[in-house]
Amino acid sequence: MSAAFLLGFCGMMIGLTLDLQSVLPEALAALCTGNRTLADSMLLHASLLPAANLLMLVGSLVGAGLGRGRWSGRIACCALMLVGMGIFEWLGPRLAGAAGLSWTFPAMVAAMTLGMAAGMALCALPQKAATRLPLRLSTAGSTTRIERAVSPSRPAR
């Protein structure tokens, strides 16, 4: 999924360049600081940065096509990256304000990038856990328990 992140980030940056033809970076960062709900902020984000959102999603889907695994999981990761980008853009000004920091355009881009990374990490957690902790259900009589699965290449400890 690293290709999905890299191509998604490149798409976001190209999209931001296109979107900034119609709005100044400082004005965009200022609009993000309003007292909005998460849903309102996500809609505003999508309407002000359509190219950044679309090209990030397209780039991440192209990158996901280079990966392995089920398509449904790869598409879910791309969607989580997009959602993470919007959530962190909404959360960023609140955290910056609480820390006494100003919210600037570079901080907004950093928050969006961190949101993409968080979305990808959230998607990768179950996959990593499944490969590191192979478990199986064992039933003996009326008792069911969860045991560590033993594979021929990986003996039990």
Image (cartoon, rainbow, N blue to C red):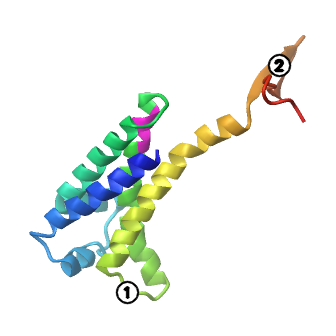
Residue 75 in the magenta stretch? The answer is yes
Task: Identify the disc placed on residue 102.
Answer: 1
| Residues packed near mark 2 inside 10 Å, few (<14), some (14 to 19) or many (20 plus) | few
Kind of residue indicated by mark 2:
Ser
The spot of residue 101 in percent (x, y) is 43, 87
| Residues packed near mark 1 inside 10 Å, few (<14), some (14 to 19) or many (20 plus) | few
The extreme left residue here reads 22
Q: Secondary structure at mark 1?
A: loop
* Residue bounds of the magenta highlight: 73-77
Q: Is residue 61 left or right of residue 140?
A: left
What residue is pinned by disc 2? 138
- For image coordinates 34% across by 52% down, the residue present is 8
Q: Are marks 1 and 2 in contact (CB under 8 Å)?
A: no
Residue 48 in the magenta stretch? The answer is no
The extreme top residue here reads 141
Whether 109 is drawn above or below 76: the answer is: below
Asked whether 155 or 145 is in front, the reply is: 155
Whether 70 is drawn above or below 62: the answer is: above
Q: Is residue 148 left or right of residue 107?
A: right
Asked if one can make out residue 40 in the rendered structure from this viewpoint, the answer is no
- For image coordinates 40% across by 60% down, the residue present is 87
